[in-house]
Amino acid sequence: MNKVLIIGAGGVGRVVTHKCAQLPEVFGEICLASRTQSKCDQIASELQRPIQTASVDADNVAETVSLIRSFQPRLVINVALPYQDLSIMDACLEAGVDYLDTANYEPLDTARFEYKWQWAYQDRFQSAGRMALLGSGFDPGVTNVYCAHAQKHLFDEIEQIDILDCNAGDHGYPFATNFNPEINIREVTANGRFWEEGEWKETDPLSVNRDFDFPEVGVRRAYLMYHEELESLCQNIKGLKRIRFWMTFGESYLTHLRVLENVGMTSIEPIQFEGKEIVPLQFLKALLPDPASLGPRTKGKTCIGCLVDGVKDGKKRRVFIYNVCDHQECYQEVKSQAISYTTGVPAMIGAKQMLTGKWLQPGVFNMEQLDPDPFMADLNQYGLPWKVIEMPVEA
Ligand code: NDP
């Protein structure tokens, strides 16, 4: 029987656990572990079948190895924070199990997320005969698989990809983030960056925008940002000339963010406060609503997809491959809003491909390097149905 260890009991951890629990034929036994065990117990109490829970500090490799050895899973699903990626990968290698995450490693003291640290594990995972699947959330994750699907089925040659991420949900607060505020704000306040003709080009934070008419949502303003899937997709999609990432933000969110930034609250540089060292962004996180508490209040939809340009049968073609998700429907199913849902479901589906052997092979992989077909089929089956629409080709 397949056993899986899930580490992290936040918004995403809740969804992954609910979704894995719904599939006992694949996920025979589940252990949910996190720093705060009471959060795991709360999630366990919401399920239709019993699971184990544990407390673990995943920054501590020895502690994580000992939990893995006592539970003996085949796979560890890491949905803690990006800071824990390397220590959990180390623990998986030491204990001899496979690994999956949804976000790439980011050092605590530099707001720079890059794959280089995790790609450096390639030889170790290969020689140990173990697999590490990186970025099995929505973006990265599903967006990478959409690109692989476009490459395999829709185009002879892909020239350009714009990844478009729209959250049109409203939680009623003047300012809150939909997932971990620290990670979210670090990402949004960083310089924009895109890849064109083999080179990275930088833009000032949120300085480039465009309006896009999102299916089922309408016109929203999207801002050019750097996002981690660009780093692997520009290498793995053959013939690509340009790839960019865009995310929508409302005016109120941007105004709050500007003010917080101007007064120094988004800084990750430690400061002395009343004899104690604090990091302003971590203090801000403590003040903001817990993303998990947004679930019951958030109404509206998300629409995330890939606008792909290229050539098929000698003709120019442009398609939008996307999913629309409704916050309230997600909450009814798994007690989480759509941002956690759209991350947690693909984590379960990625884990399913590994456990059923469809994707299992030694080494460190990004999602687009694997066959998109079984994953795309499961998206339709397990709550994230996708559509492809033809778009007018620009002259
Ligand atoms: P949360 O902050 O809600 O949850 C994080 C969880 O990890 C908490 O339960 C926390 O425990 C636990 N944790 C933190 N540090 C440790 C540690 N050292 N050891 C054990 N557990 C720890 O985050 P989310 O659920 O919103 O996000 C989870 C992950 O998903 C993040 O890496 C995020 O970047 C990623 N993500 C990916 C997306 C994608 O599309 N690819 C989109 C959204 C998120 P405690 O409660 O005790 O602090």
Image (cartoon, rainbow, N blue to C red):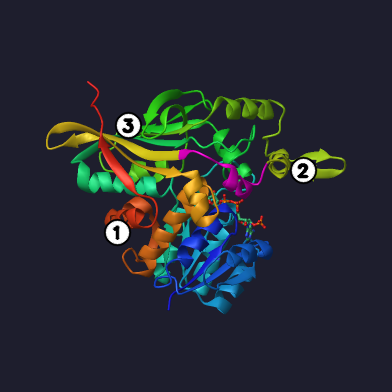
Mark 1 or 2, nearer chain start = 2
The amino acid type found where label 1 is placed reads Pro
Helix, strand or loop at mark 2: strand
Helix, strand or loop at mark 3: loop
Q: Nearer the viewer, mark 1 or mark 2?
A: 1
130 or 13, which lies in front? 13
The amino acid type found where label 2 is placed reads Ile
181 or 98, which lies in front? 181
Neighbor class of circle 1 (other Cα within 10 Å; few <14, some 14-19, many 20+) is some
Give the label on residue 278, or none: 2
Pinpoint residue 208: horizontal percent, then vertical percent. 46, 23
Magenta region: which residues?
Answer: 289-301
Location of residue 326 (image quadrant): top left
Q: CA distance from mark 3 to mark 1?
A: 32 Å
Neighbor class of circle 3 (other Cα within 10 Å; few <14, some 14-19, many 20+) is few
Number of numbered discs: 3
Q: Residue, x 52% and y 60% (percent of image)? A: 78
Mark 3 or 1, nearer chain start = 3
366 or 199, which lies in front? 366
The residue that mark 1 highlights is 374
Mark 2 or 3, nearer chain start = 3
Q: Are marks 1 and 2 in contact (CB under 8 Å)?
A: no
Question: Where 52 sits versus 15, above or below?
Answer: below
Q: Is residue 193 visible?
A: yes
Helix, strand or loop at mark 1: helix
- Indicate whether residue 163 is drawn in magenta: no
The amino acid type found where label 3 is placed reads Glu
The residue that mark 3 highlights is 197
